[in-house]
Amino acid sequence: MKYTKATNYALHTIAYLGLLPSGKAIGVKPLAEIQKVSPTYLSKVLTTLVKAGLIISAPGVKGGYRLIKDVEDITFLDVIQAVEGLNPLFHCSLDNHVHDRENCFIQQTMNEAEKKMEEHLHSQTIALVLQKIDQRVSDYLKSEAG
Amino acid sequence: MKYTKATNYALHTIAYLGLLPSGKAIGVKPLAEIQKVSPTYLSKVLTTLVKAGLIISAPGVKGGYRLIKDVEDITFLDVIQAVEGLNPLFHCSLDNHVHDRENCFIQQTMNEAEKKMEEHLHSQTIALVLQKIDQRVSDYLKSEAG
DNA sequence: CTATTATAGACTCATCGAATCTATAATAAG
DNA sequence: CTTATTATAGATTCGATGAGTCTATAATAG
Ligand code: SF4
Ligand code: SF4
């Protein structure tokens, strides 16, 4: 569980998709426009969300991306893990002379700490983000949605 | 609050120092030997611990490193923050078209999650690590201590 | 004075995040 | 069927940074 800009683009995009009327899709161009990022790169990020099963895509005219689940049912953790994968933040790669990898208190403590972080991220949904989004963004996206 | 190999070397070294009789110092060479890392590099890591006030160093014959505080009073968080600094794990660098950086729910949520992780790391002390250290390591370090 | 030890800075190397660019595939509309 | 539109894939680039190496310098016990 790490954190990169790709994750941040994903979080924003999921929130923006949540603003659209149910079932409506929107292309990558307006989504990239608002976030000031290149469409091709954002597209790459969104493709990972498609593969993770968080959103659905359709090519061609009137295509684009749309949500599958309700924003109340998508957590921060869902999005982050979809983009970043499940690798632990703390992974010991040391070649210590004497150690017991199976019964390692350091790794255990680190993983417990990471778990606390993940628990909190699992308790917060994207629905909470929507309340803070500027009305102009909402209006713009709805006007661009097909 | 991130996590690198340097932090791991620091955690191990603090634990090893905790094995020594109170007031005894030990050079970087045996510490590096056990961890299978170069002395010059480990020295660089330990210097940051010195500057952070966790350990004390002395040059010259019979010099080396020793703890200042008791291992019961040194937490995982102390060591990690000493090496990695205080930069938040989640720092938004996006240039979103419309956003309110002061009242940002995403950053707020991320920082809360990180806080949970830090709270757990603050609750675990290095004293807990000492119980798991192999007797051979303890014997070896005591024999090398000046 | 000398051997020993820590500190500092310059430097190298591999990895990886963050894109860009180009080409290809799929689809709705005419 | 054709075409414009949209997503997907892969190769490539660029800069930052983690992880060290190497060398020189400074401090201290004996
Ligand atoms: S004891 Fe644990 S943290 Fe230390 S080197 Fe072994 S696996 Fe890594
Ligand atoms: S709203 Fe928050 S997370 Fe989004 S771009 Fe602005 S500061 Fe970053």
Image (spheres, coloured by chain):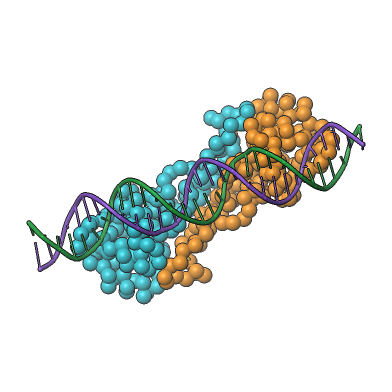
Chain colours: A cyan, B orange, C purple, D green
The residue lying at 52 percent from left, 59 percent from top is B91
Q: Is residue A9 above or below residue C14?
A: below
The residue lying at 41 percent from left, 46 percent from top is A85
Residue A101 on image: x %, y %: 55, 30
Q: Is residue B132 visible?
A: no
Residue D14 on image: x %, y %: 48, 55
Q: Is residue B110 left or right of residue B97?
A: right
Image quarter of residue A58: bottom left
Residue A102 on image: x %, y %: 53, 30
Q: Nearer the viewer, residue B16 or B57?
A: B57
The residue lying at 24 percent from left, 64 percent from top is A24
Q: Is residue A85 visible?
A: yes
Q: Nearer the viewer, residue B86 or A115?
A: B86
Viewport quadrant of the C terminus of chain B: top right
Image quarter of residue D5: bottom left
Residue B53 on image: x %, y %: 74, 49
